[in-house]
Image: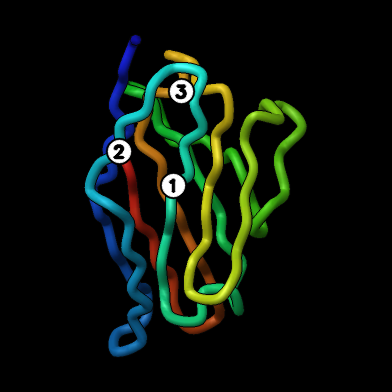
Amino acid sequence: MAWFPLLFPLLIGSTAPGAAYVLTQPSSMSKALRETANIPCSGNGISNKYVHWYQQKAGQAPGLVIYEDNKRPSWISDRFSGSNSGDRATLSISGLQAEDEAHYYCQVWDSNSIAHSGTE
C-alpha cells in the first residue's frame, strides 16, 4: 500500500487587532492512495462564515479549490468537496492520488477580521 502525507502546519492571522478569529487544523494527516481524506478546520461558530480552501503544492503558489463552503471552481476535480456545520468545516478529497500531496489552507473572512490556517 502506498502512503503519502497530508501535513497541516498552522497559520493564523488577523487584519483587525483585537478581533482575531482563530482557526485550528490537525498538524498532519496521512492517507493511502485511493482513500478519502477529510481535512477539518475548526473555529467558534465557523458555520456563520464562508470558508475557502486553498491547495499549495511544493514550489507553487496556493490555488483555490473550494470557495464559499462548498463551491468548486470549474477547473477543480469533483473529487474535492467542502462542508461547513457548527464549529467545523471540512475539505474532503476522495480517491486520493499522488498529485494531491500538498499544503491545504482553510480561510474565513468577514468585515472585522481574516483568519487562515494551513495543512501540509
Q: Residue at position x 44%, y 70% from top? A: 114
Position above or below: 55 against 38: above
Quadrant location, the N terminus:
top left
Residue 93 vs residue 2, the one in the foreground? 2
Q: Residue 104, position in %: x, y?
A: 41, 41
Mark 2–mark 1 distance (CA, rounded to whole Å): 8 Å
Residue assigned mark 1: 39
Of the residues shown, which amino acid type is indicated by label 2? Met
Label 3: element kind: helix
Mark 1–mark 3 distance (CA, rounded to whole Å): 13 Å
Q: Residues within 10 Å of mark 1 (few under 14, many from 20)?
A: many
Q: Residue 23, position in %: x, y?
A: 36, 67
Mark positioned earlier in the residue sequence (2 or 1): 2
Q: Residue 86, position in %: x, y?
A: 55, 76
Of the residues shown, which amino acid type is indicated by label 3? Asp
Q: Nearer the viewer, mark 1 or mark 3?
A: 1
Q: Nearer the viewer, mark 3 or mark 2?
A: 2
Q: Residue at position x 53%, y 47% from top? A: 91
- Give me the disc on residue 98: none
Q: Residues within 10 Å of mark 2 (few under 14, many from 20)?
A: some
Residue 28 as seen in the image, left or right of residue 16: left
Q: What colour scheme was applied to this rendering of the protein?
A: rainbow
Residue assigned mark 3: 100
Mark positioned earlier in the residue sequence (3 or 2): 2
Mark 3–mark 2 distance (CA, rounded to whole Å): 12 Å
- Give me the disc on residue 29: 2
Q: Are marks 2 and 1 in contact (CB under 8 Å)?
A: yes
Of the residues shown, which amino acid type is indicated by label 1? Ile
Q: Residue at position x 56%, y 61% from top? A: 51
Residue 110 vs residue 29, the one in the foreground? 29
